[in-house]
Image (cartoon, grey):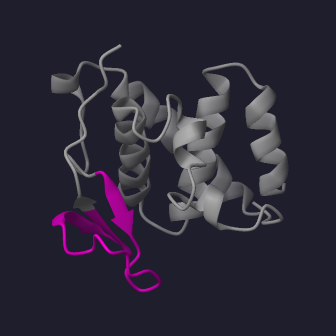
Amino acid sequence: MKLAWILWLSQVLPQPAADSLCLSTTVYLEARDQSVRGQQAVAEVALRRRDSGLWGDNLCSVVTARKQFAPSLVSSQTQLSNSEAWAAAVTIALEAERNWALPAGQRKEVVPGASHFAALSIASPSWRTAYQVATIGDHTFYKVQSLKPRKV
């Protein structure tokens, strides 16, 4: 299936299904070749950003914000063709959402406080000198800024 179709579908699905689809797509595009822990860490960064409200009020807004995550960086014609990796990404995204729905003190955080990540072999972001939380597989996770949940 093409990324363009998934992004269209995410606009017509009701919440929370749309957010689950967007998070699954991001985990697939960003980390399908990484360990489960690496995929969980990518999902955690997206969820933390959603809670902050700085990149949008829902996961679809967060992961499609300009130049933030793969859904806004790769061609909309990109094929998500690895069905095994897609199934794993969906499972990991749904588990991450369930975990993140717990009270903050009960969550299992993989990259506590991380607000950004990069694959330094292919990217050189300006914030790469920020505090490094962890390196998992090809990704280094950073606490570039303190993200606090927005007041609702």
Whether residue 88 is visible here, answered yes or no, is no
**Residue positioned most to the bottom:** 121
Q: Nearer the viewer, residue 62 or 1?
A: 62
Q: Nearer the viewer, residue 6 or 93?
A: 6
Please give left or right for residue 78 compared with residue 66 in the image.
Answer: right
Q: Is residue 104 magenta?
A: no
Residue under the point 34% across and 33% down: 52
* Residue 119 position (above or below residue 133): below
**Which segment is the magenta one?**
115-141
Residue 37 drawn at (x, y percent): 35, 55
* Residue 112 position (above or below residue 56): below
Whether residue 15 is visible here, answered yes or no, is yes
Residue under the point 62% across and 65% down: 73
- Can you say which quadrant of the picture contains the C terminus? top left
Residue 27 drawn at (x, y percent): 54, 53
Residue 147 drawn at (x, y percent): 25, 40
Please give left or right for residue 136 compared with residue 106 in the image.
Answer: right
**Residue positioned most to the top:** 152
Residue under the point 27% across and 74% down: 128
Residue 75 drawn at (x, y percent): 75, 67
